[in-house]
């Protein structure tokens, strides 16, 4: 089952087949093998195991529940919802309700990703009512409730971000302060701190970061912001110790892994940097800065194909980021592939006319 959840279908199949060799009517193994074959699209094998499964369980309801799980495996949650709703009157064990709860939870995740927060909240509440044992359900309800509140602040925050981007830090600070009055979130204190730092008021900026860290609902992001600021001040060892504490307490803190990679890179420990950057990408495979940093680390180690692969991955993850293409251009120029480098720089100039480094490199 664990191998199936990891999508290691070959290993899962081997485990289930081994179990069935000892007990040909082992229901969990037949059910698991059916899900494996369905995931792999092996229709003939699926039908054969489905028939064997139906004979073994002698229960049409259990077969129907498994059919619903196959729909879940395929991500067809709307179809699974209708399927389970059709089984509600036939089940006294609570299994159908538990599956329905999980389906509502997955549909809620989709609504949240699409920024339809009210619909997501309704789904999550229904999921908790049907299946209160879903892992993380209470946290999901809290997150989406926060998103509903945050959505009302978005116009103010977007105004602040535009002001900050044009280096009008005083106006950005004013907007962030207005948002904080409406919703005293630790993250807004971090944004206010960034404004003070940008205006050269380090003491006030640090005081706000410390205040954010003391908030009862402060996240690891706040602590990471504090140690990032410490790193900016050149206190590398102190920052490194802080990031190490974070990943010890929360191994999924990908930004801290990334920062540890950056620190290792600064110390010219490129292999060590790659270890940390790979950890960051393990927990967030769409974090573009980690791909870029890993590409440069590979390049420093003389690993050109690996460097190119990382830069290309960064481009596929975030097509709006010019740095991946720029780094590829630099790599090609350094490898005396002038024509290829020229093509990349010209493409950058066309796509990102405000990106200053490409014209410089092209002229060079």
Image: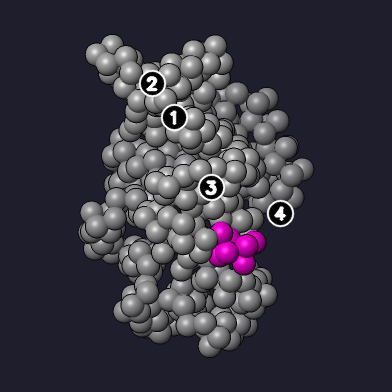
Cα distance in 3D space between marks 3 and 1: 15 Å
**Residue linked to disc 3:** 89
Q: Residue at x 62, y 67 (%)?
A: 118
**In the displayed structure, does residue 363 sit left or right of residue 136?**
right
Q: Which residue is mark 1?
A: 59
Q: Position of residue 144 (x, y in %)?
A: 53, 65
Secondary structure found at label 1? loop
Question: Residue 56: which numbered mark, if any?
Answer: 2
Q: Looking at the image, which residue is at 33% across and 77% down?
A: 216
Would you call the spot at circle 4 few (<14 residues within 10 Å), some (14-19), or many (20 or more)?
few
**Is residue 197 something one can see in this rendering?**
no
- Per the image, label 3 sits on a secondary structure element best described as helix
- Magenta segment includes 122: yes
- Horizontal relation, residue 112 to residue 184: left or right: right
Label 4 – label 3 distance at C-alpha: 63 Å
Give the camera-side residue of 192 and 35: 35
Q: How far apart, in angstroms, are the residues tagged by discs 2 and 1?
A: 8 Å
Alpha carbon separation for disc pair 2 and 3: 23 Å
List the residue tagged with mark 4.
354
In the depicted view, which residue is nearer to us: 230 or 302?
230
Which callout, 4 or 3, points at the residue further toward the start of the chain?
Answer: 3
Mark 3 or mark 1, which has the lower sequence index?
A: 1
* Figure check: 233 above or below 322: below
The magenta segment: 116-124
Q: Quadrant of the C terminus?
A: top right
Question: What secondary structure characterizes most of the magenta part?
Answer: helix
């Amino acid at each position: 089952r664990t191998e199936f959840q990891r999508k290691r279908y070959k290993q899962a199949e081997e485990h289930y087949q081994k179990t069935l060799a000892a007990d040909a009517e082992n229901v969990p193994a037949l059910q698991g093998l059916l899900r494996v074959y369905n995931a792999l699209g092996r229709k003939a094998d699926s039908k054969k195991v489905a028939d064997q499964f139906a004979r073994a369980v002698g229960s049409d309801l259990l077969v129907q529940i498994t059919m619903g799980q196959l729909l879940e495996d395929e991500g067809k949650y709307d179809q699974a919802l209708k399927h389970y709703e059709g089984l509600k009157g036939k089940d006294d064990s609570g299994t159908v309700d538990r599956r329905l709860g999980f389906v509502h939870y997955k549909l809620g995740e989709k609504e949240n990703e699409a920024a339809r927060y009210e619909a997501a909240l309704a789904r999550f509440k229904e999921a908790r009512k049907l299946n209160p044992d879903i892992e993380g359900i209470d946290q999901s309800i809290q997150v989406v409730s926060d998103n509903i509140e945050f959505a009302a602040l978005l116009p103010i925050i977007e105004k602040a971000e535009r002001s900050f981007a044009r280096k009008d830090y005083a106006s950005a600070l004013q907007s962030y302060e207005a948002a904080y009055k409406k919703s005293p979130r630790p993250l807004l204190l971090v944004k206010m701190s960034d404004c003070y730092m940008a205006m050269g008021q380090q003491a006030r900026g640090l005081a706000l970061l410390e205040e954010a860290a003391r908030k009862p609902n402060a996240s690891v992001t706040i602590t990471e912001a504090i140690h990032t600021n410490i790193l900016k001040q050149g206190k590398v060892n102190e920052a490194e110790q802080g990031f190490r504490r974070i990943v010890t307490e929360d191994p999924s803190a990908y930004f801290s892994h990334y920062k540890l990679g950056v620190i290792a890179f600064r110390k010219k420990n490129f292999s060590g940097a790659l270890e940390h950057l790979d950890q960051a990408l393990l927990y967030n495979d769409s974090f573009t800065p980690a791909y870029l940093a890993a590409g440069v680390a590979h390049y420093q180690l003389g690993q050109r194909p690996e460097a190119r692969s990382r830069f290309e991955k960064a481009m596929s993850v975030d097509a709006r980021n010019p740095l991946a293409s720029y780094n590829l251009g630099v790599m090609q120029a350094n490898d005396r592939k002038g024509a290829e480098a020229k093509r990349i720089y010209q493409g950058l100039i066309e796509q990102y006319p405000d990106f200053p480094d490409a014209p410089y490199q092209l002229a060079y």
